[in-house]
Image (cartoon, coloured by chain):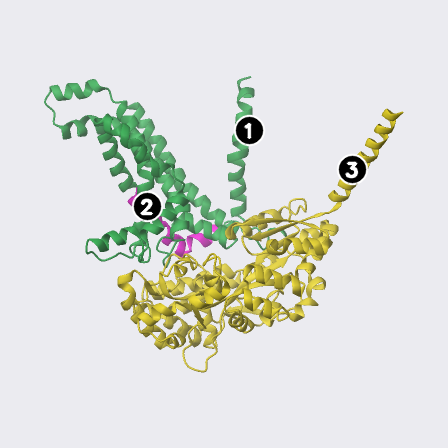
Chain colours: A yellow, B green
Amino acid sequence: MRRNGGWIWRGVVATALLTAFSFISVAQKVVVWESEGYGLGAVKDRVEQLTGLQLEIRDFPYGELRSKLETTLLTGDPGVAPDIVMVDSIWLGELVSGGYLADLTQAVAGVAKDWYPAFRNGSQWPPASGKYYGLWYDTDVRLTFYWPGLLQKAGVNPGDLLYWDTYITACKNLKAALKDQGIGGCWLDMAGGWAPDFEFFPYLWQEGGKILEKRDGKYVPAFQSEAGVRALQFLVDRVKAGIDPQTQTFWGNDFAQKKWAVYPHGNWAASESRFPKTTARERQQRIAALPLPVSAPGKVPVTLAGGWIMSVPAVLQSKAPDRFDRAVKVMQAFLRSDVMTDYYGALARVPVRAGVDRKTLSQKIEFFDFYTKLASVARVRPAIPQWSQVSDAIFQAMGDAVFKGVDPKVALEKAAEQVRQILAH
Amino acid sequence: MPYAFVAPLALALLSVSVLPLLWDVWVSLQDLRTTNILRGAPFVGLGNYVKLFHDPLFYHSLRVSLYFVVGSILGQFMLGLLIALIFHRMPAVARWLRPVFILPWILSAIIVGYSWIWMYNYNFGLINLALRAVGLHPVRWLNDISMAIWALVIANVWRGTPFTMLFLEAALKNIPPELYEAAYVDGASGWQVFRHITFPMLRPAVAINLILVTMWTFNLFDTILVMTQGGPANATLTTAMYMYKIAFRYGLFGYGAAIALVMLAINGAMALLYVRTVGKAAVS
């Protein structure tokens, strides 16, 4: 009898355990693909708590993410597709035109009202069309960082970094004064296809120019305008003054190691990833930040904002609606103001929306108020499907002007002709 | 019956080389892009090839490839042959130094690229530090349009020389020693021995080596991607790099496939040369 009772109890315990395990396995998984360091990882626990879903986050190197995403989505098989994808904002047009991303207008249009206009419009395709294919959740801004001590040593006034002409003189003085210490004066980025983001587009916009404009519903090049020529001439003037164009970049690590006195770059150059084991306050005490230089007083120091858009593959919407609903649920949890505050705080990122806890973030993120001020008036690149070709044509014009001595107007006209042909196809 | 034994291997070869090649040909006849791949790309016939032969950047890339291949081969072959001869003459030295000399060949192209980027850096690189230390002006290795391609050639020669060295050293070991003994008995000088015995006997190996290295160098793209991405101002844009850019950066798969097939034709010509040279050498 005792023996039989033991078996009954064991059976009850086993059944209870099996039931518990089956409940655990019911917590469904949402697979997220993101570029290393830019995504849900920082708030994974919080989102899981809010949704009751389990997140499986897979990080890819930047260059690999796009090709991996495209080859996977090409199969049209939801079995191999992730549930949520983070796409670089400049890929949006290409991915939407290819039919890879789901229309998320219903899911995000409401919350997007809180977004700064550039990021709200940039989450739509065509831009500002009212059709959302995701939501921009993370951005970066370009600005000038400098080491105050080095400027002082070289007798350079930081205010000189605010205007084109005085900037060039300041850089020449810095180069001469710091040469013997193995420290460069001013960084000038010609390191790859992204160089126009740092060295051309912000100055083009500051001068009132545009990269592309729409005529009769079609994009045409506009960067070869007078404003474009002035922007490119500023680049040429800097090189002629002895500021060496750099063809390799270390993404701010060299600035953190004091290899450069002045570093016009993305805000990540001042982040903890470049200055390990430092607080935001400590970084603010060590380095200083200014807007990018403008040609004359009174001009707005417009900057360029990049960043990431959170989206869902179209194949889920058509072939796996349950998974699509779960992905949207996770997105909506992440897009809560409090969760995004946690996200920005954890990764020291620049917010794309007004409704975040600024007090908390200003303690966690260096130069927070300055970054958000820049982000609120920043411009974004047109995310057309041919963007990488357009950007490369402009980079080629920069290279021709800087390395081959081609007149900026001629170089830009040649690039514009190339872009006209690219956009015609 | 013999065909049945060969069939599995033939099928495997067909599936991994012939089918992808046919697929590539098919893709090159369409305007296939990332933006139309799901909907079906338009058939353009030879349109991509016509476009290619009117593309000035393609001709520029061929010119850059020519400099890169010729520079790399000259450097790699001369150095490889010299080291192979030294090692052949001095086996004791070879035993100690061979592993050190092979090291660049076993490193991945990416690691080689990053190492050379650091060494070439204008401000902090080892090479410019050395130049400054001896009172010379630093060089803009990768920032100068006339210098960048040669900087890549140096890095590639550094990586490829061990292969040529090993290849030729193995060939040197196959030369019958009696030939040398007879030549020395007849009073031949070192140069005469090299000119009339060593080099003629090495010729088949040299031909194979040169053609293999030519094809590899023509196709090389990873080191260039890491070091210059084809810049500055397209000064290092080789054909392989251009194809990568077109297909994988711009998402123009049809046009990229056309470039790949033209590259294949160039490599095919090299292979033909290889087969003919080896054939002639075998006959002689």
Q: Dot 3: what SS? A: helix
Dot 2: within a 10 Å radius of its alpha carbon, few (fewer than 14), some, or many (20 or more) residues?
many
**Residue highlighted by disc 2:** B155
Dot in front, 3 or 1: 3
Chain bearing tag 3 is: A
Left or right of A44? Residue B44 is left
**Residue highlighted by disc 3:** A18
Distance Cα–Cα, label 3 vs label 1: 49 Å
Residue A113 drawn above or below residue B87:
below
Left or right of A242? Residue A361 is right
Residue placed most toward the observer, B191 or A54: A54
Distance Cα–Cα, label 1 vs label 2: 40 Å
Q: Is residue A101 magenta?
A: no
Amino acid bearing label 3: Leu
> In the rendered structure, which segment of residues is drawn in magenta?
B48-72
Q: Are tags 3 and 1 found on a single chain?
A: no
Q: Find residue B42 and name its label.
A: none
Q: Dot 2: what SS? A: helix
**Residue highlighted by disc 1:** B11
Residue B191 drawn above or below residue A423:
above
Q: Residue at x 42, y 47 (%)?
A: B240
Q: Are tags 3 and 2 found on a single chain?
A: no
Q: Is residue B61 magenta?
A: yes
